[in-house]
Amino acid sequence: MSDFVIVNEVGPRDGLQSQGKTLSIEERLLMIDALLDSGIRSIEAGSFVSPKAVPQMAGTGELFGLLPMTDAVDYSALVPNLRGYELALAAGVRSVAVVLSATETMNQRNINMSLEQATDVCAALMQRARQDGVQARAYVAVAFECPFEGLTPPPVVEYLSQRMFESGADKVIIADTIGAANPRSVRQVLERLDSAGMARQLSCHFHDTRGMALANVLAALEWGVREFDSSIGGLGGCPFSPGATGNLATEDLVLMLAGMGLRTGIEPLALVDVVKRVQALTGTPLGGHSYRWLERQAGKRQGVSHA
Ligand code: COA
Ligand code: ZN
């Protein structure tokens, strides 16, 4: 099995969308520059959603026009509907992610669609992306628990994932939107998806609300998952899910993977500087479980190089 793991940084989207402070386009670009400096090469850079619903993401089209473009970086954008997809395409986006929540209420709250409508819209967008040669990811959100409807039945996650793959999704992202999963529930879902032949094309998106995100990553690694979303410094939340706090911190994910001998192309100590730069931009105290330790190690290294 591959020893390379894709770390998809979602701080510029999932992280920023729930911040009280709305960053300017220039500040969002500075954040992305900092991420690129650490070796991160997969970034969800923003979303094409209603600026009334998520003002923090206004101007994502302009942002895409200003990103340092290179084939070495996969910049993606979240799109909730056809309108968002077309705006993304017009802005030059080549990689999109749709968001399909596993419950009726979550779809209503998040994108004002029923579960059935959202499934059809997301399936149509996956087909469209495939025709346009655009890379397509599909989030299955609240895949473990919904803040409105409680525990999510794994067969629903299997059905929705299957629909997304059949419609042309390159990847399905199993998302624990409110950070309620544990290794057992992760295994239950992934076992089903593996039996249906899907585990290796999955990515997982964990929030660290209850401190279990890394344990959940380990459970997913054991099922062959080799792509994870994370957010620098643990920035994040979801404005439409009460109780959702920050994402799994990128530095925690990268440090654990490095320690396990898995490659990500990202140097864990380089993330200290990124956390500091993003903290200064957002004005939010940041840092995952390992941050203090990483900061000390980075300090020692600097001390050595200055000696
Ligand atoms: N991007 C920008 N504007 C959009 C849009 C998009 N993708 N889709 C719709 N709009 C605009 C419409 O033009 C309309 O504008 P107006 O009021 O100035 O005429 C307004 O939004 C309402 O359009 P409508 O089609 O009725 O949408 P809605 O009110 O049912 O809202 C969404 C649907 C999807 C646009 C909205 O719920 C949304 O943006 N949700 C984002 C959720 C999100 O980002 N969640 C976090 C990530 S999981
Ligand atoms: Zn999230």
Image (spheres, rainbow, N blue to C red):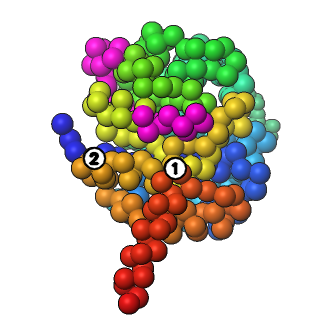
- Name the kind of residue labelled 2 in the image: Met
Assess whether residue 222 is covered by the magenta stretch.
no
Classify the position of ligand 1 by quadrant: top left, top right, bottom left or bottom right. Answer: top right
- At 48% from the left and 25% from the top, the residue drawn is 182
Please state, as top left, top right, bottom left or bottom right, where the C terminus lies in the image. Answer: bottom left
Alpha carbons under labels 2 and 1: distance apart: 17 Å
Determine which of the numbered discs, if any, sits on residue 260 in the image. Answer: 2
Where residue 47 sits, quadrant-wise, is top right
> Please, what secondary structure does the residue beneath circle 2 have?
loop
Residue matched to label 1: 289
Left or right relative to 170: residue 262: left
In the rendered image, the vertical position of residue 106 relative to residue 229, given as above or below = above
Position in image of residue 80 (x %, y %): 61, 33
Q: Is mark 2 within 8 Å of ligand 2?
A: no
In the rendered image, the vertical position of residue 35 relative to residue 230, given as above or below = below
Position in image of residue 178 (x %, y %): 61, 30
Q: Nearer the viewer, residue 297 or 129?
A: 297
Please state, as top left, top right, bottom left or bottom right, where the N terminus lies in the image. Answer: top left
* Crowd rating for badge 2 (residues with CA inside 10 Å; few <14, some 14–19, many 20+): few
Provide the residue span drawn in magenta: 191-215
